Image (cartoon, coloured by chain):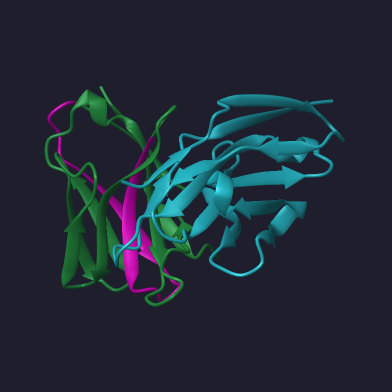
Amino acid sequence: DADVTQTPRNRITKTGKRIMLECSQTKGHDRMYWYRQDPGLGLRLIYYSFDVKDINKGEISDGYSVSRQAQAKFSLSLESAIPNQTALYFCATSETGTSFYEQYFGPGTRLTVT
Amino acid sequence: AQSVTQPDIHITVSEGASLELRCNYSYGATPYLFWYVQSPGQGLQLLLKYFSGDTLVQGIKGFEAEFKRSQSSFNLRKPSVHWSDAAEYFCAVGAGGSQGNLIFGKGTKLSVKP
C-alpha cells in the first residue's frame, strides 16, 4: 500500500462549490504539506503543518483552508471553488529533524473547476 | 529569496545517449538540494538529494548529480537514457529556516527518442 494517499484522485466541480481534498499517510511523519502544480509553474506551497496544533500558510493560501484531523490526516478545502483553482494538488510528508526537507509525495488529485 | 531555475523547459534525447539536466539555485547558505521525477499521471518521486559532504551524489535509477557551489548549480546526469526515463524532472531547494518546505523549479520535460 502507498505511504501517502490522496482522495479523490480526480474531481470535477462547479464554480462556487465547496470541495475537500483528503490526504492520509502511514509514514508516521509529523510534517505535512499541500502543494499545487500548474503547467509551467512547478509546485507551489499552499499550507503546511508541523503537527496537529501547528498549521501555517504557504505561498498561495488565499482561497484555501486546511484541517489537520490527526497526525496522519491533512485535508485541504476550497470554500468556494473558482476556475483558476483548476490544478493538480499534491500532499507531501516529512520527518521532523535534520531530514525535514526530504519530502514524500502522494499521487496527486486532479481538480477541475468549471 | 531562495529560487530555483531550470533553464530547459523541454529536452529530447535519443535512447542510449547521455543526459544532463540543468539546475541553478539562489540561496545564501549551504543549500539542501533535491531532484524529483514525475512520470505521466504519477506523483513526485525523490531521485536524489544533497545535504552536505561529497558533492557528487548518486540516486536511484542510475542518476547522479553534482553540487557546484561556485556555479550555484546542481545538474542531474545519466550516462545512458532509457525510454522509461521520459518524464518531467524537478529540481528543488530547501526554503531555509524551520519551515521545511521546498522551493521548486518549473521543471524540465524529458522526451526520449527510440
Q: Which residue is at 60% across, 24% downward?
A: B10
**Is residue A23 inside the magenta stretch?**
yes
Which residue shows up at 25% across the image and 31% down it?
Answer: A85
Q: Quadrant of residue A84?
A: top left
Position above or below: B93 against B85: below
Q: Position of residue A69 (x, y in %)?
A: 21, 68
> Does A26 appear above or below A47?
below
Above or below for B67 versus A97: above
**Quadrant of residue A110 in the image?**
top left
**Foreground pick, B57 / A38:** B57
| Magenta range | A15-37
Q: Position of residue A87 (x, y in %)?
A: 35, 33
Q: Is residue B1 visible?
A: yes
Q: Percent x, y for residue A114?
A: 25, 22
Q: Residue at x 77, y 53 (%)?
A: B62
Whether residue B36 can be seen here: no
Q: In the depicted view, which residue is nearer to us: B95 or A24?
A: B95
How would you classify the magenta stretch by its main secondary structure?
A: strand
Q: x, y (%) of residue B63?
A: 72, 51
Quadrant containing the N terminus of chain A is bottom right
Q: Is residue A97 placed above or below A80 in the rendered structure?
A: below
Pick the residue in front: A37 or A83.
A37
Count the marks: 0
Q: Which chain is green?
A: A
Residue extending farthest to the right is B16
Q: Residue at x 75, y 40 (%)?
A: B84
Q: In the picture, which chain is cyan?
A: B
Residue A54 highlighted magenta (yes or no):
no
